[in-house]
Image (spheres, helix red, strand yellow):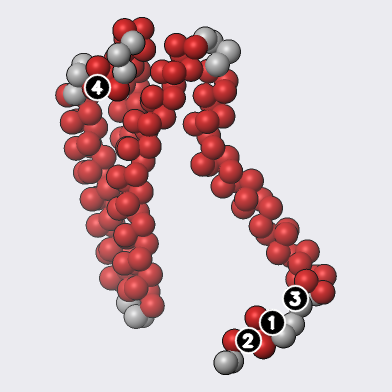
């Protein structure tokens, strides 16, 4: 097949300038991605200084934040594909319209989910944990998480 020569026929690591450029581009992206995906875990380590209840509360809040993040991220992922499709077809005006619609839909979804979340803020902590201390901390922190979701 055609691809075998490209895959197995050459050793691209011998091209030192290309390998250098690859690492020059990849290392900052990898570091940024590590920070983006490990941010909550890093903050959980910092919360450990405050005590075990605070650490557990922060870990539970991380779960709640992941639920928020997944909903808006799903809209973003779908709109990326839609915009790329329109651009690939040579229709930049429709891609722009799709992007505006996606921003609007994501904002409305964030507001709706936040409203449901705030309406359940006195019930949800009891579903997440049986510890009264952690429940009290969660009730205090849920409005801040809700504010973070809509901004």
CB contact under 8 Å: marks 3 and 2? no
Question: Tag on residue 127?
Answer: 4
Q: CA distance from mark 2 to mark 1?
A: 6 Å
Q: Residues within 10 Å of mark 4 (few under 14, many from 20)?
A: few
Q: Quadrant of residue 81?
A: bottom left
Identify the mark nearer the N-term, 3 or 2.
Answer: 2
Residue at numbered disc 3: 12
Identify the mark nearer the N-term, 4 or 2.
Answer: 2
Q: CA distance from mark 1 to mark 4?
A: 54 Å
Seen in the picture, residue 91 relative to 42 is either above or below; the reply is: below
Q: Residues within 10 Å of mark 3 (few under 14, many from 20)?
A: few
Question: Tag on residue 4?
Answer: 2
Q: Residue 123, position in %: x, y? A: 20, 19
Mark 2 falls on what kind of element? helix
Mark 4 falls on what kind of element? helix
Residue at numbered disc 1: 8
Identify the residue at horizontal 66%, vertical 57% (top origin). Answer: 26
């Amino acid at each position: 097949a055609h691809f075998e020569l490209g895959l197995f026929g050459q050793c691209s690591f011998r091209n030192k300038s290309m390998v250098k450029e690859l690492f020059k581009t990849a290392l900052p992206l990898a570091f940024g991605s590590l920070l983006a995906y490990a941010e909550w875990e890093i903050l959980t380590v910092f919360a450990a200084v405050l005590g075990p209840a605070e650490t557990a509360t922060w870990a539970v809040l991380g779960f709640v934040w992941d639920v928020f993040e997944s909903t808006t991220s799903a809209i973003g992922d779908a709109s990326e594909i839609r915009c790329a499709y329109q651009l690939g077809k040579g229709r930049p005006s429709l891609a722009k319209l799709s992007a505006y619609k996606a921003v609007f839909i994501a904002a409305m979804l964030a507001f709706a989910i936040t409203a449901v979340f705030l309406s359940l803020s006195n019930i949800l902590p009891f579903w997440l944990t049986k510890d009264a201390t952690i429940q009290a901390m969660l009730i205090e922190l849920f409005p801040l998480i809700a504010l973070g979701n809509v901004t």
